[in-house]
Image (cartoon, rainbow, N blue to C red):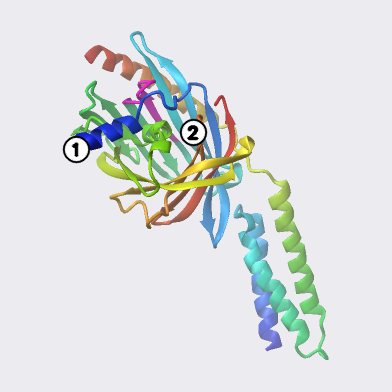
Amino acid sequence: MKKVFLMLCLSAIFQVGVSQIKPNETLIFSGSYELGGMMTNLAQVTMRTEPMNTSKKTYLRLSIEVSTFDKWDSFFKIRDLYESYVEPITLKPSLYKRNVLEGGYTKTEKYSFTAAGTSLTSVASRMKRAETKRTLNVPASASDVVSMVYKLRMIDLSKIKNGQSLPFVIIFDEKQLPVWVKLLGKETIPAGNLGKKECYKLSISAKTNKLKGADKNLIWISADSKRIPCLIKFSIPVGVGQVTLLKATGV
Amino acid sequence: MRKVFIVLASIFSLIALVLTFLPMGTIALIPVALAVVFSLLAMTKKREKSQVLPKILFFLSIVIFLAIIAKDVFVKDKIVVDQQFIQDKQESIQDAKMELEGLDSIN
């Protein structure tokens, strides 16, 4: 009975159409990293949505690009591209691609999800080594990291109490990763060209050594119908940083 | 003690100068602040001795401080138009389209 109640609650929270992700939306952020106790601007992060048509279906291409500012390119060049091709209404992923260039390190990953979403084929390569191909069984609700960010925006956070956590499963580095998103409350913060915005403050935690500290990985999502991510703070084993919204267009 | 302060002010001025030319933002304010403090301390010790070097170090630190602030205020962060990255993105989209066509036919 408890499970049925939980399912009903979750389905109400993830109610489709609460906040629709529009195509042709561009969000530009500045990514900073703490060096010597001071936040130093390191890279531009661009989140983009575009329609993608095949001969049979229409997908939504969700992408996150990370490019170091030109002053950093000679020291540590980053050109990361994360893409997720999803069903436009439910954001259920069909294809996820990751192409990482960080300094001299390169990595590519491609996950092709089956229609049921219960398994995926992964093709990965690191540092130009031979590609490895694997098949993984995953929960039907599993997301990739890009579609997870966008799914967060579709949650009706007004129905969640402060301190309440929502469970997710993401596939990252070819592994299933349980993730919890906890609502910490509301705060008003600067949101680039949108001015000051009242935001939901969410804490992200996961069973991984890649995220550090309790309530140290945070995301602020505007508490309006657009649900724009305005600020992200992260704490990872090699330091802390933040991603701040500069400009939002097409929202 | 005066010599120690002069040496420390010189070292921190040099570190600040190097960091000013690196893309580390305002992190150079830390050594420059220390350089200012040690050059001022050097000036207050043994006033009968020549104050030329501590004054030069103090002046240099102030110039570096102003350069750091000017760089932070006037030099805007921008990304270069990376043709290779643009091409990689276009190729990735084309590859994805072919992959999705394949998935559509299987599913």
Q: Is residue B1 left or right of residue A39?
A: right
Q: Chain of mark 1?
A: A
Q: Marks 1/2: CA distance?
A: 29 Å
Task: Report the side of A10 relative to A248 (left or right).
Answer: left
Q: Name the kind of residue labelled 1 in the image.
A: Lys
Residue A140, quarter of picture: top left
From this view, report whether residue B49 is shown above or below residue A227: below
**Magenta run includes residue A90:** yes
Residue at the location (45% across, 18% down)?
A51
Query: Is residue B98 inside the magenta stretch?
Result: no
The residue positioned 35% from the left and 24% from the top of the image is: A90
Residue at image mark 1? A3
Question: Residue A227 bears which disc, if any?
Answer: 2
Which residue in the rendered view is the most extreme toward the left? A1
Going by the numbered disc 2, the residue's amino acid type is Arg
The residue sitting at 51% across, 30% down in the picture is: A226
Range covered by the magenta-colored residues? A81-93
